[in-house]
Amino acid sequence: MTASEFKALARAALTRAASWLRPHLRPRSLLLLPALFCIYVLVLIPFTPGIRDIRRAKVDQPAQIYSADGKLLAEFRPTHREWVSLKEISPQVIDALIATEDRRFYQHHGIDFRRTAGAALRTFSGDRQGGSTLTQQLARNLYPEEIGRSQTLTRKLKEAITAFKIEALYSKDEILETYLNTVPFLYNAYGIEMAARTYFDKSAGQLDVLESATLIGMLKGNSYYNPVLNPERALDRRNIVLGQMVKFGHLQPAKLDALRKRPLRIDFERQTEEPGRAPHFAQQLRKWLIAWADDNDYNIYSDGLVVRTTIDSRLQTMATNALAWQGNQLQSIANAAWGGRGGCANANVDLGHAFIRETDQYRALRTGGANDADALKHLGADRAFMQTLCENKTRVQAAFVALDPRNGQIRAWVGSRDFTQDPFDHVAQARRQPGSTFKPFVYGAAFDRGAKPTDTFVDQAVEIPIRGDEIWRPTDDSPPSGRPVSLRDGIAYSKNRITAQLMESVGPARVARLARDMGVRESHLDVVPSLALGTSPVTLKEMVSAYGTIANDGSYIEPLLVTRIENKDGDVLAQFESAPERALSVDATRKLVDVMRDVINRGTGTAIRTRFGVRADVAGKTGTTQDNADGWFILMHPQLVAGAWVGFNDSRVTLRSDYWGQGAHSALPIVGDFMQRSLRSHVIDVRARFDTQETPGFWATRLTRLRTWIAQTFTSEPKPSAAKQTSVQKPVRAKRAPSEPEAEVTDAPSEPPVFTTMPPILPAPGEAASSVAPAAPAEAASDTQQ
């Protein structure tokens, strides 16, 4: 039976019962009505908010979010509100409130029966008026869902019962304080303190009688009496409040006429919450924490939870500063490339027209009857419109994230250049093509199948059939040399043709599976040959997580935001850690780390050494996508993996520079500056080294043992006396200047070259260094499908 059918049957039953009772009712029977009413009230009591809920509502204890080193990152409040005590609120606010909303507030116990009866009589006579006390209004404001919003007897009874409970639990001052701190005032301002700041740019304790009357007057109808949009109505309502204050003895009558003539004098400014040290991280954490709290019966806004996160406030500050510095440098380049403010349409007419056609103003003109040409001409001539449009489209964006590969703990997270200007999170939300930073998955899959860094492919034109009659022809920034190129050189110099041939031998399915196992687990990967050059969009968080797997000897650890959650008394409610999962064999991973060192030592990432003076054992990869739309760089250290992305929100916009558009020049400086500072401050250890010694296999181990046994058993040479071993010759290490990157390989060496497996020792950061860094070998700009 449906709800409507049930209501119809109930209505019919009540009608029949009333028709039967009517002739049988006598005056004595009317005494049953109060009893029935009392029974109904008793039935409603269990359906009203409980005492525990009321106590929780008053004691507002938002979750506090702390960094790993004990710094407060954020507080999760349900609304934009700052709680102030009653002593911190102007007495004139309280006088205006009581005179206007509840003049017998200190005499009743939750319900003013005289006012309620009077309001009922006036309502029956056609003049509808409210009779709710402040306590009833507080109950309605705090528990709108439990009490309801409909104008019914049941709702009023629930409201009255809750008001009685509040009066039993709180003192009058506590009720006033709670009411004034929870009542809404539009513009996301809750409570008298935020209202005072929003409309008068002062604290609640500084409000004068006119300002107090204006804000209290809004309570009758926030929108209708909005002093910003409806100043005349707000002025009239303010004067009514002043009259009420005179009527009930809160204001001298002699002052009323003069006060009524005074203007509103609104000083309006929307209040915004402080973004905090890691606003994008906090934004992501709030979603996770709400889900955890729901599953474990906690409230993040009132239970006083203390959340210990993985963020290191020192690293977070370094990352924020590095990204802001590089972002400002690139913005000046973008402004020049796009003709300055308002010049995007002149720099690229077709693209400028496309931007205009995507605006609401253009659609409004077309709806009004204008044709395409007229709409474009009209909006193109509007200098203010074009300036705003071009500034938004050509604003450089960037993102950065760093994590500890040993445990997956995220140490720094910067989602955009300015959270207040662009709250969109480019770390976890934006999906962009990763370009050549995806290539390590191809090389890792090859090493896992037995390939060696010294294996070669001929640098030649490549044509790979994909679907139907389509042919994929990857290119580099230089023509094919026809010479063999080793896998080590292929990744060091980011050779697309070498990587494409390696992808063909390994297979796209194997590469996609490895990428997912290593950390790219949320984005869809197209299983096609061009995946080798990063054509499937992914997030920066996924890529840095996958590089963390490489730095962790091939074991994937899910990125971790929180280490533990405590209650307000310090008791631990939950602890968190991520279990490692084997994604790539140890031997293959160590080969991959070793060849990725060469990206930094002599390949496309040499600026890490030459410009930023990083002398630690690091490995990494640059990445650039088609037309330089995206610049990437990810750097691995045994204790920290950091990655950055640079681009624009609209991928059709680029820096329009083959130099600055490359990841080696756009994203690398962010990571380089960050890593340099983190090493100098000793947050990570400059002496930490990757273990790239290959682990011998089962048969190799036993063969070595057999050879040792044979040599020890059948050798006839006497062992040297320990007494004669008085000196040991120290090995001499050949030195190679790190500031001299090798030229790109164009000829095959006659003999396999010998590569170092450890980074060269560079001067300490404080020592003298060349002021002009040599340019890094150019990374191939065409990293996507041609």
Image (spheres, grey):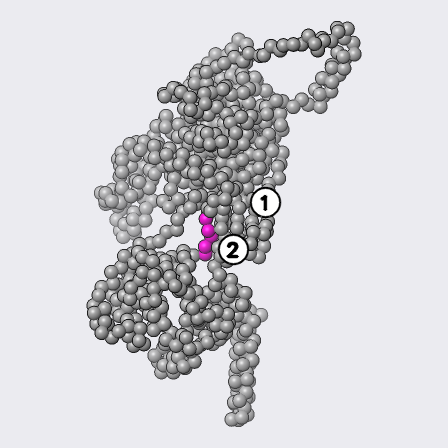
Residue drawn at 74 percent across, 14 percent down: 707
Residue drawn at 33 percent across, 54 percent down: 270
User: Where does the C terminus fall, quadrant-wise?
Assistant: top left
Answer above or below: position of 57 versus 287. Answer: below
Residue occupied by mark 2: 304
Highlighted magenta segment, given as a residue range:
74-78
Q: Which mark is residue 576?
A: 1
Question: Residue 84: x, y in percent?
Answer: 40, 60
The mark nearer the N terminus, 2 or 1, is: 2
Q: Dot 2: few (<14), some (14–19), or many (≥20) neighbours within 10 Å? A: many
Asked if residue 606 can be seen in this view, the reply is: no
- Residue nearest the observer in this picture, 336 or 738: 738
Kind of residue sitting beneath label 2: Gly
Camera-nearest label, 2 or 1? 2
Q: Looking at the rendering, which quadrant does residue 232 occupy?
A: bottom left
Question: Judging from the image, what secondary structure is the residue with disc 1 in?
Answer: loop
Question: Residue 719: x, y in percent?
Answer: 73, 9
Answer above or below: position of 774 versus 421. Answer: above
- Residue nearest the observer in this picture, 304 or 510: 304
Magenta stretch, main secondary structure, is strand
Report the side of 754 relative to 612 (left or right). right
User: Where does the N terminus fall, quadrant-wise?
Assistant: bottom right
Question: Judging from the image, what secondary structure is the residue with disc 2 in?
Answer: loop
For marks 2 and 1, give the CA distance: 19 Å
